């Protein structure tokens, strides 16, 4: 944002290492896909439409999604995006920790201070940013109920792809 003039549309894939307790839906090592869009007259509705289109194309059918208010330091407002769990059709399973929903990404509208610090006037420029775990997308698409399988080293799991 400091080196390029808007409008901006970027996608940034990368490997992530995170210190946290592991369970069926949390891993210390995963891939993240981050995105940012900066333009004039961008709202959360633009983000919602884009992400609904993405999920429909990726999964081959429309999905139920929900936004939950959440805090991330570089966005305001921030929200967590959940999709209805495809493993259990929303009934509850180990992949969704029995909730029927799976957190797919953190997102939000780019904080005005981030725009200002990049030399952009937030009165004219807005945008959204998101980050999603790629393994969770794959888990939903291929009905994998434990994220730890990806890096567990079991060749029987890996060879099915
Ligand atoms: Zn489930």
Image (tube, helix red, strand yellow):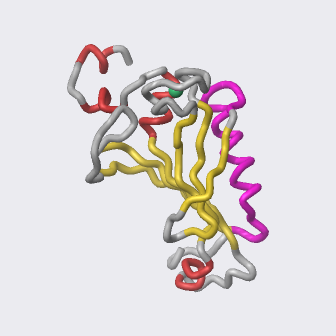
133 versus 98 height, above or below: below
Is 143 displayed left or right of 86 in the figure? Answer: left
Q: Residue 16 at what x, y percent from top left?
A: 33, 51
121 versus 148 height, above or below: below
Residue at the image position 61 percent from the left and 61 percent from the top: 108
54 versus 68 height, above or below: above
The residue nearer to you, when weighing 118 against 143, is 143
**54 in the magenta segment:** yes
The residue nearer to you, when weighing 7 against 68, is 68
The residue nearer to you, when weighing 65 against 133, is 65
Residue 25: image quadrant is top left
Residue at the image position 22 percent from the left and 20 percent from the top: 154
Region in magenta:
39-63
Is 23 displayed left or right of 141 in the figure? Answer: left
**123 in the magenta segment:** no
111 versus 148 height, above or below: below
If the image is split into quadrants, where does the N terminus sit? bottom right
Is 109 displayed left or right of 3 in the figure? Answer: right
């Amino acid at each position: 944002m400091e080196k390029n003039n808007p409008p901006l549309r970027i996608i940034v894939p990368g490997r992530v290492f995170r210190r946290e307790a592991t369970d069926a839906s949390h891993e210390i090592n995963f891939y993240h896909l981050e995105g940012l869009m900066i333009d004039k007259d961008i709202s959360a509705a633009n983000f919602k439409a884009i992400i609904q289109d993405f999920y429909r194309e990726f999964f081959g059918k429309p999905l139920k999604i929900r936004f939950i208010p959440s805090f991330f330091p570089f966005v305001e407002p921030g929200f967590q995006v959940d999709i209805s769990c495809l493993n259990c059709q929303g009934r509850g399973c180990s992949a969704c920790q029995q909730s029927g929903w799976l957190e797919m990404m953190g997102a939000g509208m780019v904080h005005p201070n981030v725009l200002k610090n990049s030399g952009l006037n937030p009165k004219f420029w807005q945008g959204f940013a998101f980050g999603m775990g790629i393994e969770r997308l794959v888990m939903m698409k291929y009905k994998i109920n434990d994220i730890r399988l990806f890096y567990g080293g079991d060749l029987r799991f890996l060879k099915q792809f």
